[in-house]
Image: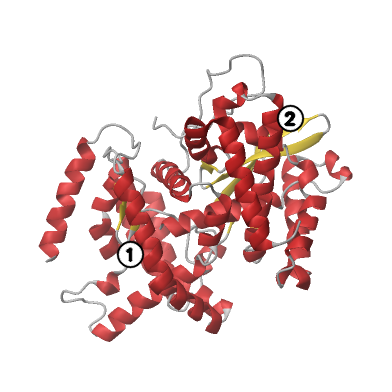
Amino acid sequence: MKKNIFSASAVLLLVAGCAGAPAEDPLEPYNRAMFSFNEKLDNAALKPVAKGYKAVTPAPVRTWVSNFFGNLQDPWIGVNNLLQGKPADALNDLMRFVFNSTLGIGGLLDIASEAQMPKHDEDFGQTLGVWGVKDGPFVVLPLFGPRMLRDAAAIPADWAGNSPWSQPYENPIVHDDTVRYGLSGLNAINGRANMLGLERTLDEGTLDKYRFARDFYIQQRRFNVHDGNPPLEEYEDFDSDEGGDAAQDTGENP
Amino acid sequence: MMKRLFARAVLALSAFLAVSPSFAAGEGLPPDELVRTVTSEVLTIIRSDKAIQSGDFGKMLALVDEKVLPHFDFRRMTSLAVGRDWRSASPAQQERLTTAFRTLLVRTYSNALIQYRDQTTEVKPLRANPGDKRVRVNTEVRMPGAKPITIDYSLEQGGAAWKVFDVTVAGVSLVTNYRGSFGDEISAKGIDGLIASLEAKNKSLEAAQGGK
């Protein structure tokens, strides 16, 4: 089973590596269908549970829960920083994990951020991007939601890295299935609760929410792969009389 | 993941609405000071106003209208959202597009602003040269368990006042992010088709949210 996941991801990776052109959404009909399927599923299952959770859980507790799971991800973030050739950032992430796990009471408190050790956002998909793997087409996965194909291929690695408790085989960290599923469930519900209300804004604020979400996602991933230093956007002046097409807009890969 | 990203968008644009200078005296402030002052002023009002929190949307719109809107360059924003088709629009069409887009943004993100009022924003020191007519003010919004979200406000100086014309959330311009779907509308139904779609959307929002 595990083997299958990994070989499937190897195939995806290969495809992602070959897909040279930046995504203009060749999978759009499928993607739209899956986007709306995920939405229905969310409405029927995760969202109501997240609402209930939010209603009964005080805000500070939800912050602790978010910090707790965020802390467990820091080692994997550090590994990716190392793989991307940023040892200083990797050390920062390791120190965060050490500080927060101990003085931060098992990660409930993010004291490392207070101590000027900033939280990073890295994953294996970004690492592949830094290594030169093209992002490939945009794809909406069942349950997981939107990904670039490259990042879809990285899911098994990221899943293992981000939720070390959830790995089923001879798990050195958590032996008890109940605890394992409990943690995974709590992580999902808490994460969803943090985002409640967004779907409403997406509904209200856009003419075509799939399109808006997709464009946002694609640009955001590129920004992340460049660690927040992609080429700056040029603002064209559409009001001027000069044909100012020279300064073209956002989003193309350098 | 998607949801998290979109959260950034929502946060940003809602903070965006909270950001503009709300008093004439603000004209003398440097842009980063302006962002800091106004963000905290508007959020303070929302946090303390029970009527707004319990769903008096008309009151929220009035607040945004008074404190925020006069200091936004919505025409500039709309031209950036529409892209090159802006030039082929007649002045009357540009006017209607601007009005409709402004209404859409205000209604949507006023609502979001109410929901996300408890997040804290840190405004970074401004990196700009004296005499710059266009600056980007960088801010960070803290979220537990996640990397802080960067929200950058682009302001331009027109006359004495700085005006916000774009906001960039985690690297993505929220204004130009509309360009794709607006472009789709225009190729399918023309500029008047886009105007009609925006106005219909605003009508349905008004029906659902109330407030004028």
Residue B136: percent from the left, percent from the top? 64, 38
Residue under the image location 31 percent in, 56 percent down: A79
Relative placement, left or right, of A36 versus B127 is left
Is A251 on the left-hand or right-hand side of B10? left
The residue closer to the viewer here, A242 or B149, is A242
Q: For residue B130, which numbered disc appears in the image?
A: 2
Q: What amino acid type should be assigned to the residue bearing mark 2?
A: Pro
Question: Please, what secondary structure does the residue beneath circle 1 have?
Answer: helix
Above/below status of A129 relative to B107: above
Question: Which of the chains bears the disc numbered 2?
Answer: B
Q: Nearer the viewer, residue A31 or B27?
A: A31
Q: Amino acid at mark 1?
A: Asn
**Residue B169 in picture, x, y percent from top left:** 55, 47
**In the picture provided, is A128 more to the left or to the right than B119?**
left
SS category of the residue bearing label 2: loop
Hey, which quadrant is residue A93 in on the image?
Answer: bottom left
Residue A162's label in the rendered image is: 1
Asked if the residue at tag 1 contacts the one at tag 2, i.e. Cβ–Cβ closer than 8 Å, the answer is no
- Output the chain of dot 1: A
Q: Residue furthest right?
A: B25
Spot occupied by residue B208 in the image (x, y as percentages of width and height): 64, 62
For image coordinates 65% across by 52% down, the residue present is B203
